[in-house]
Amino acid sequence: MLFHMLLMFLFLPSKSTFRLYNSNVELVCFFLFLCMQDVLQHIHSLMPMQDAARAACASRSFLNSWICHPNLYFSKDTLGFNENACQKDESVRLFYSKVDHILERHSGIGIEELTLILVPFGAKYNFPRSVLLNGSGDSIQYLHLTNCSFRPTVTFGGLRSLTKLHLCLVRITGDELGLLLSHSLALEKLELVSCDRIVYLKIPPLLQRLNYLEVCSCAKLKVINNEAPNVSSFTFGGSSTVQLSLGETSQMKSLIMYCCGSVFFARAELPSSMPNLEALTVHSHTERAYAPMLCSKFLHLRRLSIALTGASFYPTYDYLSLASYFDAAPSLETFNLNNVSIFADPADLRQMRELQHHNLRIVSITGFSSAKSLIELTCHVLKSMISLECMTLEAPQSCVRCTDRDNKSGKCSPLERDILTEGHRAVMAIRRYIEPRVPFTVKLHVLEPCSCHAVDLYY
């Protein structure tokens, strides 16, 4: 806009060119100054908050634009607190006073992202509602709060431009969250993690743009009632006793569940309630029943990930029952199995009825063990998936590996002896029972336990 106005004054018609020359030059200089200010303000807005604050201390021009800086990120790092200081009450109070001072001095105009992470501090912090009153929060598009209290009231004006809200360890009730949501009609993503004061979560139908909902580890949560009509991705982590009422689920495209019994639940219930699922991930700590063989189908499912996380390997779980998912998902392209002794005659391996699968191309199994049913499932995949191109079987690995960039020791973190022993047994089982069955069209990648553990195993 200023550039166009500058051109207008440069070519301003005048009857007395010489007489108006000086005044036009003054106007041009004035608009050049404004353009330069806009350029500096734009540069300042692109700086990280720490650098922007330093620049504001060194330059009056940057000081003026600092109060309109669009991205505010508060953490112990950005405010210069180390781990030792985080444990002292005096430092905690100083941290909070700095946050309050910056928020109160900030004009509120132009804030687009506001992040407040207070994880290292044990003291309680109340997020100042005044920062968002009287339309001062209307420009905020992303709000991230961690470990604080947030108490919206009936006088709360809302966040009209908010598209993403992330609350972690935030002390807020379901009713208070409802007030916030009812005034945030542009919201597209809602993430709630460890918000333990929420018992009943209701997502109002006014949130027409909401497409992603995540609710994890909210200890007192009993009910999720979603009335937003366009949620297509849902992530849930919590108790299997939580009542889920997700509204119109036929348009659900992606589902992630961290819940005991979710492997059985997903196979038994989801084909009918979420028939258009394209991506499914289930993490289960315990399974009381095997995946059932049913006639219901996931006709659109293309990506499936299953993680059994209760132990490093499950010698008693019937992994072959997971073949039920293959029969139910004719469009499946990618299958991942995570964290899951066979040394018997290969003739004893069970076989499922042969149904050819024409879409599954990639299979990955991590935490591979020598469990007989897991070997049977792998052999079933090799025999039935005629479109298979790549299979990766990975024995149990350390959380910190010798190849990690940040690992200065150059060694993998220790593994328990029984896990390490099982890892080597898994590799032996792969060599004996799986490799001979691999078609020449399939690339098999076997990742053995790292050589860092060789001494540990035979010590």
Image (tube, helix red, strand yellow):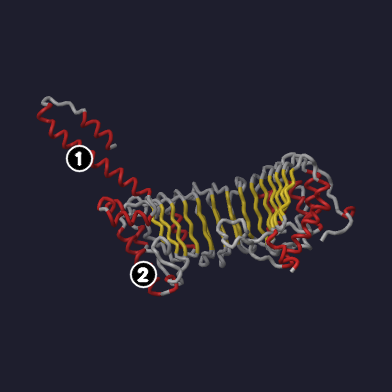
Residue 203, image x and y in percent? Answer: 51, 55
Tell me which residue sits at (33%, 56%) in the image: 53
Q: Which mark is residue 17?
A: none
> Along the horizontal axis of the image, is 267 left or right of 431?
left
Q: Quadrant of residue 318?
A: bottom right
Disc 2: CA contacts within 10 A as few (<14), some (14-19) or many (>=20):
few
Residue position for label 1 = 30
**Could you tell me which residue is drawn at 42 percent across and 74 percent down?**
88
Q: Nearer the viewer, residue 412 or 133?
A: 412
Q: Inspect the image, locate mark 2, and give the three-letter code of the amino acid beneath it.
A: Leu
Dot placed on the residue nearer the N-terminal end, 2 or 1: 1
Identify the residue at image location x=74%, y=43%: 443
**Helix, strand or loop at mark 2:** helix
Q: Nearer the viewer, residue 172 or 345?
A: 345
**Vertical placement of residue 389 versus 212, above or below:** above
Q: Is 80 placed left or right of 215 in the picture?
A: left
Q: In this view, does 289 lie above or below 274?
A: below
Determine which residue is flagged by label 2.
94
Q: Which of 104 and 152 is in front in this view?
A: 104
Specify the quadrant that holds the C terminus: bottom right
Q: Which residue lies furthest to the bottom in this view?
A: 89
151 vs 342, left or right, is: left
Query: Residue 289 at x, y = what percent?
Result: 75, 60
- Residue 176 coordinates in the image, percent (x, y): 45, 62
Q: Percent position (x, y) of residue 272?
A: 69, 49
